[in-house]
Image (cartoon, rainbow, N blue to C red):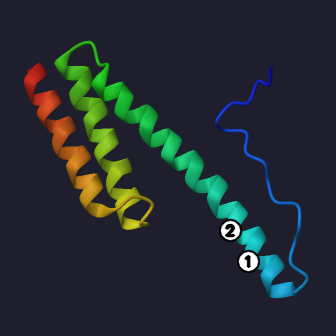
Amino acid sequence: MWDWSPSLKVERTELPNIKSAKKRVRLSRDANERNRAVRSRLRTAVKRVENAEDAATAETEYRRVQVLLDRAATRRLLHPNAVARMKSNLARRVGAMS
């Protein structure tokens, strides 16, 4: 009946009246959009490593992913332990290709 994809979320319509609260809502929305874009870019980069055809391609893609993951951990977009786990699993996968 309805074609609702997971990315379509109903947004709250009531807004705060206080100026600082309005600003907080605006900043939160901007940060949310930015974080969503970065997370999406990360997932795509990780998939490139996982779906690499040969070891050389996987190695170069893994180097790019490492930088993106470290940056995400530094900015606390992802938990540092989660990033370490992802890097470890990807390194193991790339190593198995060689």
At x 24%, y 25%, the residue is 58
At x 16%, y 44%, the residue is 88
At x 79%, y 54%, the residue is 11
Where residue 65 appears, as percent x and y from the top left, is 33, 41
Rendered-image quadrant of the C terminus: top left
- Tell me if label 1 and label 2 are in contact, CB under 8 Å: yes
2 over 8 or under it: above or below: above
Q: Which residue is mark 2?
A: 28
- What amino acid is labelled 2 in the image? Ser
- What amino acid is labelled 1 in the image? Arg
> Splitting the image into 4 quarters, where does residue 60 fall?
top left
Q: Nearer the viewer, residue 21 or 46?
A: 21
Q: What element does badge 1 sit on?
A: helix
Q: Nearer the viewer, residue 79 or 58?
A: 79
Q: Is residue 49 left or right of residue 39?
A: left
Where residue 10 appears, as percent x and y from the top left, is 78, 48
